[in-house]
Image (cartoon, rainbow, N blue to C red):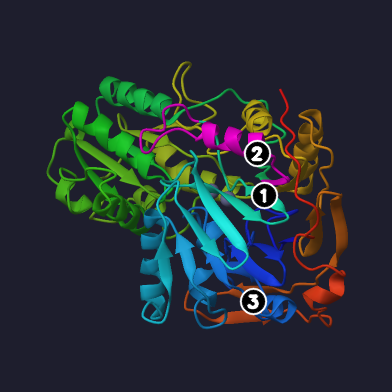
Amino acid sequence: MVVPVGGLGRIGMNWTLYGHDGRWILVDAGIAFPEDRSGKVDAFIPDPETLRRVVGRIDALVVTHAHEDHIGAIQYVFPRVLSCPIWATPFASAAISRRLEEAGTLDEADLRTFPVGGAFRIGSFAIRSIRLTHSVPEAVALALATPAGTVLHTGDFKLDPTPLIGGPTDLEAIHALGNAGLLAMVGDSTNAERDLPVTSEAQVRDSLRRIFQSRAGTVVVCCFGTNVVRAMSAVDAARSTGRQVALAGRSLRVHAEVAEQLGLVDTQDILAEPSHLRGLDRREMALVCTGTQGEENAVLARLAGGKDWRLPQLGLGDTLVMSSSAIPGNAEAIERVLAPLRSRGVEILTRDDAPEGLTVHVSGHAGRAELATMHRHARPRFVIPVHGTEAHLQAHAALARDCGAEEAPVGTAGEALAVSVNGVKRLGRIEIPVLGVRRDGGILAVRASKPVPRAEELGRAPGIAPSEAHRSRPRA
Ligand SMILES: [Zn+2]
Ligand SMILES: [Zn+2]
């Protein structure tokens, strides 16, 4: 049984329950960001108490990658509200342990790591992780095998041929799953509506080098704090043009440090503090910073304010590269931050208005062509689109059927789907309240909840309905 708890019909809050034979695992525990950033609520999470009432015990949380929409809820919920081992790759595990440390619960947590490509068993599930490319190091897909068949949970992915850290998406492993007969695929739908070319981090690295070479002033690159590869591409461009470079922004520094400790990157000649850039000539300075979404307290907003003595003063002749995309709803906040920089004459390059031939940002999610490639290798009988708005999910379902899936039902959050060789059956919907949480750990709003049915009451057969062995069905 598959219960997408969140991530359907909205962006964020990716939690997916998998059950078999009365045993349950949870894949990912992320947050959704509020559209109103005025500060009452920092994030939304599904009510963990309700999940516990529905399924009883959860054997483990397994994490696909270290993005907020996949791990951001862990520090609010684990290990005190939900208590079970948390499995993650070394990078994600290190990111999670920092959060638990801050929450003061690291000692109580049972954090376990698996290598990218590693296999392990939890309860009824034999789990294998498969290397993917995305916009954070060590993202994986999970092949979840039970006697009822194998389900591939893709996590967030793209097919970057030259990801710069780690190898490309392991399509051979996915093809092998297809050869053995894949019952279902639960897959990323983010860009299912978009015809995108296959893009790579190497393109961005090359463009950043060209930008750094051709600009005479200070160059600032603004990117997501988790995008270690992107930050290191900017560092590399700075080095190659004789600039001193610093990282500014907590998330950026934490993730770079974790990657350094794991031997994924070399941060040796990055300045310890942005303030160490002071006194240098403008053409000798570079900064990598956070604040891509126009967040009020982030480094980019402080740079724009021009009043933080630790940061370079930007003006005519300097360049800001927005190496990111705007999360829907944030365009205005971003423009508010960029306006003062523009008026001071700073050149601003964004994904949409960079000069011809320069790629300052690539998406971390597969466009339609890459999704189709994934489907053709995996050859699942059934596809459950997740990670997207209703339109994304519908587009992914249509694409899945074009690629040969027998069924591709679009569910809603909380809907319990029984997957068996006979098809995907909708068992019912669990009303899961959404809670607002604050960074200080406070839980603010609890929406009244209807009585919650236990998993067994949703259908006669909890678990991915066991039946005759799934026959192998290779397609050309
Ligand atoms: Zn995601
Ligand atoms: Zn992601």
Quick one: 323 or 411, which is closer to the camera? Answer: 411
Q: Which region is colored magenta?
A: 160-186
Residue at image position (25%, 33%) is 236
Q: Is residue 355 above or below residue 435?
A: above
Residue at 72% across, 46% down: 184
Q: Are marks 1 and 3 in contact (CB under 8 Å)?
A: no
Q: Secondary structure at mark 3?
A: helix
Which residue is at a point 31% across and 35% down the rendered structure image? 234
Taking 178 as reference, is 271 above or below it?
A: below
The one nearer the camera, 196 or 426, is 426
Q: Which mark is residue 331?
A: none
Residue 272 percent coordinates (x, y): 17, 53
Reading the image, the residue beneath label 1 is 150
Quadrant in which the C terminus is drawn: top right
**Marks 2,1: beta carbons within 8 A:** yes
Give the Cα separation between the discs numbered 2 and 1: 9 Å
Task: Say whether residue 130 is left or right of residue 379.
Answer: left
Residue that badge 2 annotates: 180
Mark 3 C-beta to ligand 1 under 8 Å: no
The answer to whether residue 174 is magenta is yes
Q: Dot 3 corresponds to which residue?
A: 48
Question: Which label lies toward us, 2 or 3?
Answer: 2
